[in-house]
Amino acid sequence: MPAPSAFYAAYQEALRSWPDPVDVRMIATPYGLTRVNSTGPEGAPPLVLLPGGGTSSLVWGVCLRAGLARERRVHAVDLVGEPGMSVAAEGRALRTPADLAAWLDAVLDGLVEGAVELGGYSYGGWIAAHYAALRPERLRRLVLLDPTQVCAGLRPGYVVRAVPMLLRPTPERIRSFLAWETGGAVLDQAWLRLRAAAAALPTARPVTGARPVLGPEVPLLALFAGAARCHDPARAARAAAQAAPGAVVAVLPSVSHHALLFAGAGEVVGWVAGE
Protein backbone atom coordinates (compact mmCIF):
# COMPACT_ATOMS: atom_id res chain seq x y z
CA MET A 1 0.00 0.00 0.00
CA PRO A 2 1.51 3.39 -0.96
CA ALA A 3 2.26 5.76 1.90
CA PRO A 4 -0.14 8.73 2.19
CA SER A 5 1.29 11.87 0.62
CA ALA A 6 1.75 13.75 3.93
CA PHE A 7 3.79 10.92 5.41
CA TYR A 8 5.84 10.51 2.22
CA ALA A 9 6.62 14.25 2.17
CA ALA A 10 7.65 14.20 5.85
CA TYR A 11 9.81 11.10 5.23
CA GLN A 12 11.64 12.79 2.35
CA GLU A 13 12.12 15.96 4.41
CA ALA A 14 13.70 14.02 7.29
CA LEU A 15 15.92 12.03 4.92
CA ARG A 16 17.33 15.22 3.37
CA SER A 17 19.09 16.00 6.65
CA TRP A 18 21.20 12.82 6.47
CA PRO A 19 24.87 12.98 5.48
CA ASP A 20 25.26 12.64 1.71
CA PRO A 21 25.24 10.45 -0.19
CA VAL A 22 22.37 8.18 0.88
CA ASP A 23 21.92 4.92 -1.00
CA VAL A 24 18.31 3.66 -1.04
CA ARG A 25 17.47 0.01 -1.60
CA MET A 26 14.29 -2.07 -1.55
CA ILE A 27 15.26 -5.62 -0.60
CA ALA A 28 12.94 -8.53 -1.38
CA THR A 29 12.18 -10.79 1.61
CA PRO A 30 9.57 -13.52 2.21
CA TYR A 31 7.56 -10.94 4.16
CA GLY A 32 7.65 -8.08 1.68
CA LEU A 33 9.96 -5.38 0.36
CA THR A 34 12.23 -3.83 2.97
CA ARG A 35 13.48 -0.25 2.60
CA VAL A 36 17.10 0.31 3.68
CA ASN A 37 18.77 3.73 3.78
CA SER A 38 22.57 3.44 3.73
CA THR A 39 25.27 6.04 4.28
CA GLY A 40 28.91 6.20 5.28
CA PRO A 41 32.15 5.17 3.58
CA GLU A 42 31.87 2.34 1.06
CA GLY A 43 33.89 -0.61 2.30
CA ALA A 44 33.78 0.47 5.95
CA PRO A 45 32.62 -2.09 8.55
CA PRO A 46 28.83 -2.52 8.23
CA LEU A 47 26.48 -1.47 11.02
CA VAL A 48 22.84 -2.52 10.49
CA LEU A 49 20.36 -0.54 12.58
CA LEU A 50 16.79 -1.42 13.58
CA PRO A 51 14.45 1.35 14.84
CA GLY A 52 11.89 1.23 17.61
CA GLY A 53 8.25 0.39 17.16
CA GLY A 54 6.01 3.04 15.66
CA THR A 55 8.89 4.73 13.89
CA SER A 56 11.27 4.22 10.97
CA SER A 57 14.92 4.30 9.98
CA LEU A 58 14.71 8.12 10.06
CA VAL A 59 14.96 7.99 13.86
CA TRP A 60 18.75 7.67 13.40
CA GLY A 61 19.14 11.04 11.67
CA VAL A 62 20.55 13.06 14.59
CA CYS A 63 23.03 10.30 15.46
CA LEU A 64 24.17 10.21 11.83
CA ARG A 65 24.69 13.98 11.82
CA ALA A 66 26.70 13.53 15.02
CA GLY A 67 29.09 11.16 13.22
CA LEU A 68 27.66 7.65 13.58
CA ALA A 69 28.60 6.83 9.97
CA ARG A 70 32.03 8.44 10.09
CA GLU A 71 33.87 5.12 10.29
CA ARG A 72 31.07 2.68 9.49
CA ARG A 73 28.80 1.92 6.57
CA VAL A 74 25.42 2.37 8.26
CA HIS A 75 22.42 0.49 6.90
CA ALA A 76 19.23 1.78 8.56
CA VAL A 77 16.19 -0.44 8.08
CA ASP A 78 12.46 0.34 7.94
CA LEU A 79 10.69 -2.48 9.77
CA VAL A 80 8.03 -4.32 7.76
CA GLY A 81 4.59 -3.53 9.16
CA GLU A 82 5.72 -0.36 10.97
CA PRO A 83 5.48 3.23 9.69
CA GLY A 84 8.06 3.62 6.96
CA MET A 85 8.60 2.85 3.30
CA SER A 86 8.83 -0.94 3.55
CA VAL A 87 5.94 -2.82 1.91
CA ALA A 88 4.48 -5.86 3.66
CA ALA A 89 3.59 -8.91 1.58
CA GLU A 90 -0.09 -9.75 1.40
CA GLY A 91 -1.00 -12.88 3.32
CA ARG A 92 2.46 -13.33 4.87
CA ALA A 93 2.65 -11.62 8.25
CA LEU A 94 5.52 -11.64 10.71
CA ARG A 95 4.22 -13.54 13.73
CA THR A 96 7.16 -15.04 15.68
CA PRO A 97 10.81 -14.30 16.50
CA ALA A 98 11.69 -17.05 14.01
CA ASP A 99 9.80 -15.11 11.31
CA LEU A 100 11.75 -11.98 12.22
CA ALA A 101 15.00 -13.93 11.96
CA ALA A 102 14.05 -15.22 8.50
CA TRP A 103 13.14 -11.67 7.44
CA LEU A 104 16.42 -10.29 8.74
CA ASP A 105 18.34 -13.14 7.06
CA ALA A 106 16.97 -11.95 3.72
CA VAL A 107 17.75 -8.30 4.50
CA LEU A 108 21.35 -9.08 5.44
CA ASP A 109 21.76 -11.35 2.41
CA GLY A 110 20.74 -8.40 0.23
CA LEU A 111 23.09 -5.96 1.95
CA VAL A 112 26.43 -7.45 2.85
CA GLU A 113 28.65 -10.50 2.87
CA GLY A 114 29.90 -11.97 6.12
CA ALA A 115 29.17 -11.06 9.72
CA VAL A 116 27.84 -7.61 10.66
CA GLU A 117 27.44 -5.38 13.67
CA LEU A 118 23.72 -5.27 14.48
CA GLY A 119 22.20 -2.45 16.49
CA GLY A 120 18.68 -2.01 17.76
CA TYR A 121 16.87 0.73 19.66
CA SER A 122 13.82 0.07 21.86
CA TYR A 123 11.67 -2.61 20.14
CA GLY A 124 14.39 -2.87 17.50
CA GLY A 125 16.68 -3.97 20.32
CA TRP A 126 14.27 -6.79 21.17
CA ILE A 127 14.40 -7.93 17.54
CA ALA A 128 18.19 -7.64 17.41
CA ALA A 129 18.64 -9.57 20.65
CA HIS A 130 16.42 -12.41 19.41
CA TYR A 131 18.41 -12.48 16.17
CA ALA A 132 21.67 -12.70 18.12
CA ALA A 133 20.31 -15.67 20.06
CA LEU A 134 19.13 -17.44 16.89
CA ARG A 135 21.95 -16.48 14.47
CA PRO A 136 25.08 -15.73 16.51
CA GLU A 137 27.32 -16.73 13.60
CA ARG A 138 26.05 -13.79 11.53
CA LEU A 139 27.03 -11.10 14.03
CA ARG A 140 30.34 -9.50 15.00
CA ARG A 141 28.73 -7.47 17.76
CA LEU A 142 25.29 -6.70 19.17
CA VAL A 143 24.54 -3.07 20.08
CA LEU A 144 21.45 -2.50 22.22
CA LEU A 145 20.25 1.06 22.85
CA ASP A 146 17.69 1.09 25.67
CA PRO A 147 16.07 -2.14 24.43
CA THR A 148 12.58 -2.81 25.73
CA GLN A 149 11.40 -6.19 27.04
CA VAL A 150 14.96 -7.57 26.86
CA CYS A 151 16.46 -6.98 30.29
CA ALA A 152 13.46 -5.64 32.22
CA GLY A 153 9.70 -5.54 31.85
CA LEU A 154 7.66 -2.45 31.04
CA ARG A 155 6.47 -0.31 33.90
CA PRO A 156 2.66 -0.41 34.31
CA GLY A 157 2.40 3.38 34.37
CA TYR A 158 4.18 3.64 31.04
CA VAL A 159 1.86 1.09 29.48
CA VAL A 160 -1.23 2.92 30.77
CA ARG A 161 -0.01 6.19 29.24
CA ALA A 162 0.90 4.52 25.93
CA VAL A 163 -2.29 2.50 25.34
CA PRO A 164 -4.54 5.36 24.07
CA MET A 165 -1.83 6.45 21.61
CA LEU A 166 -1.33 2.89 20.41
CA LEU A 167 -5.03 2.03 20.04
CA ARG A 168 -6.11 5.28 18.40
CA PRO A 169 -3.03 7.25 17.34
CA THR A 170 -3.43 10.91 16.48
CA PRO A 171 -0.73 13.56 16.03
CA GLU A 172 -1.88 15.20 19.27
CA ARG A 173 -1.70 11.97 21.28
CA ILE A 174 1.72 11.12 19.86
CA ARG A 175 3.15 14.55 20.69
CA SER A 176 1.58 14.53 24.16
CA PHE A 177 2.97 11.09 24.98
CA LEU A 178 6.47 12.00 23.79
CA ALA A 179 6.41 15.25 25.76
CA TRP A 180 5.41 13.33 28.90
CA GLU A 181 8.05 10.60 28.53
CA THR A 182 10.90 12.95 27.59
CA GLY A 183 10.06 15.64 30.13
CA GLY A 184 9.66 18.12 27.29
CA ALA A 185 13.11 17.47 25.80
CA VAL A 186 13.80 19.02 22.40
CA LEU A 187 13.41 16.37 19.69
CA ASP A 188 14.37 16.59 16.03
CA GLN A 189 11.53 18.57 14.48
CA ALA A 190 11.62 16.87 11.06
CA TRP A 191 11.44 13.46 12.74
CA LEU A 192 8.66 14.66 15.04
CA ARG A 193 6.60 15.78 12.04
CA LEU A 194 7.20 12.36 10.47
CA ARG A 195 6.19 10.60 13.69
CA ALA A 196 2.97 12.61 13.85
CA ALA A 197 2.20 11.94 10.16
CA ALA A 198 2.53 8.20 10.85
CA ALA A 199 -0.75 8.35 12.81
CA ALA A 200 -2.59 8.08 9.49
CA LEU A 201 -0.84 4.86 8.46
CA PRO A 202 -2.12 1.33 9.05
CA THR A 203 0.29 -0.85 11.01
CA ALA A 204 0.62 -4.57 11.57
CA ARG A 205 0.43 -6.19 14.98
CA PRO A 206 4.01 -6.26 16.30
CA VAL A 207 5.63 -9.57 17.08
CA THR A 208 5.72 -10.23 20.82
CA GLY A 209 6.87 -13.08 22.97
CA ALA A 210 9.37 -14.13 25.59
CA ARG A 211 12.44 -12.12 26.36
CA PRO A 212 15.44 -13.10 24.24
CA VAL A 213 18.25 -15.01 25.91
CA LEU A 214 21.47 -13.02 25.97
CA GLY A 215 24.73 -14.88 26.25
CA PRO A 216 28.47 -14.72 25.61
CA GLU A 217 28.29 -15.95 22.00
CA VAL A 218 28.06 -12.41 20.56
CA PRO A 219 29.98 -9.46 22.06
CA LEU A 220 27.42 -7.10 23.59
CA LEU A 221 27.41 -3.33 23.93
CA ALA A 222 24.36 -2.04 25.84
CA LEU A 223 23.48 1.55 26.69
CA PHE A 224 20.43 2.42 28.79
CA ALA A 225 18.62 5.75 29.18
CA GLY A 226 18.90 6.75 32.83
CA ALA A 227 15.65 8.74 32.86
CA ALA A 228 13.61 6.18 30.91
CA ARG A 229 10.00 5.85 32.04
CA CYS A 230 9.39 2.59 30.16
CA HIS A 231 11.44 0.41 32.52
CA ASP A 232 13.90 0.56 35.42
CA PRO A 233 17.19 1.41 33.67
CA ALA A 234 19.49 0.45 36.54
CA ARG A 235 17.79 -2.93 36.87
CA ALA A 236 17.96 -3.46 33.10
CA ALA A 237 21.67 -2.63 33.04
CA ARG A 238 22.40 -5.08 35.84
CA ALA A 239 20.45 -7.80 34.06
CA ALA A 240 22.37 -7.22 30.82
CA ALA A 241 25.73 -7.44 32.59
CA GLN A 242 24.72 -10.62 34.42
CA ALA A 243 23.22 -12.31 31.34
CA ALA A 244 26.16 -11.63 29.03
CA PRO A 245 29.48 -11.91 30.86
CA GLY A 246 32.02 -9.59 29.30
CA ALA A 247 29.37 -7.19 28.02
CA VAL A 248 30.10 -3.46 28.03
CA VAL A 249 27.10 -1.91 29.77
CA ALA A 250 26.38 1.65 30.88
CA VAL A 251 23.54 3.97 31.85
CA LEU A 252 23.38 7.47 30.36
CA PRO A 253 22.04 9.78 33.10
CA SER A 254 19.29 12.34 32.62
CA VAL A 255 18.14 11.15 29.18
CA SER A 256 14.76 9.51 28.65
CA HIS A 257 13.97 6.53 26.45
CA HIS A 258 12.36 8.50 23.64
CA ALA A 259 15.00 11.25 23.74
CA LEU A 260 18.02 8.92 23.70
CA LEU A 261 18.76 9.20 19.97
CA PHE A 262 18.19 12.97 20.02
CA ALA A 263 19.33 14.64 23.25
CA GLY A 264 21.76 11.76 23.82
CA ALA A 265 23.01 11.47 20.22
CA GLY A 266 26.56 12.60 20.91
CA GLU A 267 26.96 10.13 23.77
CA VAL A 268 25.41 7.33 21.72
CA VAL A 269 27.85 7.95 18.84
CA GLY A 270 30.84 8.07 21.18
CA TRP A 271 29.68 4.93 22.97
CA VAL A 272 29.21 2.92 19.79
CA ALA A 273 32.58 4.13 18.48
CA GLY A 274 34.29 3.22 21.76
CA GLU A 275 35.40 6.79 22.45
Image (cartoon, rainbow, N blue to C red):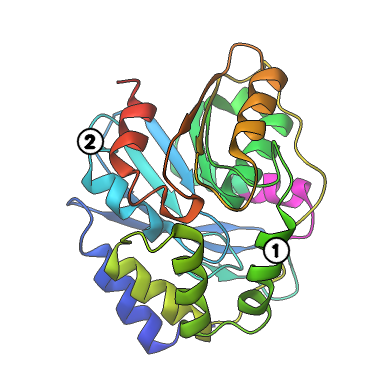
Mark 2 highlights which residue? 41
Which residue is farthest right?
Answer: 210
Judged by depth in the image, the label closer to the viewer, 1 or 2, is 1
**Would you say residue 2 is visible in this rendering?**
no
- In three-dimensional space, the C-alpha distance between marks 1 and 2, rounded to whole angstroms, equals 40 Å
Locate residue 70: give its quadrant. top left
Choose the circle earlier in sequence order: 1 or 2.
2
Q: The N terminus lies in which quarter of the figure? A: bottom right
Per the rendered image, the range of residues in magenta is: 94-103
Amino acid under disc 1: Val
Mark 1 highlights which residue? 159
Residue 162: percent from left, percent from top? 64, 69
Q: Who's the residue at 47% across and 56% down the image?
A: 258
Amino acid under disc 2: Pro
Whether residue 170 is situated above or below residue 161 in the rendered picture: below
Q: Who's the residue at 65% across and 25% down the image?
A: 238
In this view, the residue in front, 167 or 263, is: 263
Whether residue 28 is situated above or below residue 100 in the rendered picture: below
Residue 51: percent from left, percent from top? 50, 53
Locate residue 125: give its quadrant. top right
Label 2 secondary element: loop
Report the number of discs.
Answer: 2
Whether residue 129 is situated above or below residue 39 in the rendered picture: above
Q: In the image, is residue 186 part of the stretch drawn in magenta?
A: no
In this view, the residue in front, 188 or 44, is: 188
Q: Who's the residue at 41% across and 53% down the image?
A: 259
Q: The C terminus lies in which quarter of the figure? A: top left
Residue 40: percent from left, percent from top? 25, 40
Left or right of 110? Residue 263 is left
In this view, the residue in front, 8 or 254, is: 254
Label 1 secondary element: helix
Whether residue 41 is situated above or below residue 220 in the rendered picture: below
